[in-house]
């Protein structure tokens, strides 16, 4: 669902909710005989709150995709919270209503590293000239995400992992860090 379509959809839902709650508020006001003055501000506020709620959900979702804390991004990619052995976790990401890309970098011990690249991840052979997988073609990675410059590395890839189209885990033997790039496109 494209961002333009999402905005139109949420605007229509907001308008419908506003209209329905406005009619309901008017009906309650007329049925109470206009004698409950303390009820009047709530009857005015309800349509506004109902109309604004879907827009707030859309905006909140977009803000979360772009500014989520590191542990939340790790959990979204791997479906588990980072263990205490995951150290120096750095993340970056960007997302809209129809795509998201996440970059992770961290250090961990070999036990966690073995778990991270277990099935459904498959080892990727060393790249053929001009066909390097790291980083996947997309946005420019953050400056601290240096997996593409690491010469001595092991790369594992999973496709269609939960909501992610591609997840690439790169262990750089030169600096001892693990780099992850995950993305989905609707």
Image (spheres, helix red, strand yellow):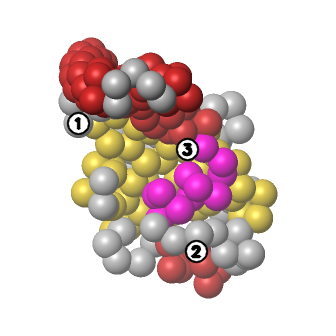
In the rendered image, the vertical position of residue 13 relative to residue 120, given as above or below:
above
Residue that badge 2 annotates: 113
- Nearest the viewer among 44 and 35 is 35
Q: Position of residue 135 (x, y in %)?
A: 47, 40
Q: Which residue is mark 1?
A: 186
The mark closer to the camera, 3 or 1, is 1
Position of the C terminus by quadrant = top left
Name the residue tied to disc 3: 103
Q: Measuring 55% from the left and 44% from the top, which residue is drawn there?
A: 103
Instruction: Give whichever of discs 2 and 3 has the lower sequence position.
Output: 3
- Say which residue appears at 74% left-offset and 75% top-offset: 84
Residues packed near mark 1 inside 10 Å, few (<14), some (14 to 19) or many (20 plus): few
Asked whether the viewer can see residue 38, the reply is yes
In the figure, residue 16 lies in which quadrant?
Answer: top left
The residue mark sitting in front, 1 or 2, is: 1
Alpha carbon of mark 2 to alpha carbon of mark 3: how far? Answer: 17 Å
Magenta region: 68-78
Dot placed on the residue nearer the N-terminal end, 1 or 2: 2
């Amino acid at each position: 669902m494209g961002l333009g379509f999402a905005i139109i959809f949420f605007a229509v839902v907001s308008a419908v909710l506003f209209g329905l709650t406005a009619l309901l508020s008017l009906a309650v006001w007329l049925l109470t005989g206009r004698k409950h003055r303390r009820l009047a501000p709530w009857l005015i506020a309800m349509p506004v709150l109902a109309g604004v709620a879907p827009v707030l959900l859309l905006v909140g979702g977009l803000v979360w995709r772009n500014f989520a804390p590191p542990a939340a991004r790790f959990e979204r990619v791997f479906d588990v919270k980072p263990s205490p052995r995951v150290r120096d976790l750095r993340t970056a990401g960007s997302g809209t209503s129809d795509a998201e890309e996440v970059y992770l970098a961290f250090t961990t011990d070999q036990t966690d590293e073995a778990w991270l690249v277990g099935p459904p991840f498959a080892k990727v052979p060393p790249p053929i000239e001009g066909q390097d997988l790291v980083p996947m073609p997309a946005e420019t990675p953050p400056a601290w995400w240096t997996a593409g410059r690491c010469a001595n590395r092991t790369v594992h890839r999973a496709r269609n992992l939960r909501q992610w189209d591609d997840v690439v885990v790169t262990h750089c033997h030169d600096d001892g860090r693990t780099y992850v790039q995950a993305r989905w496109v609707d």
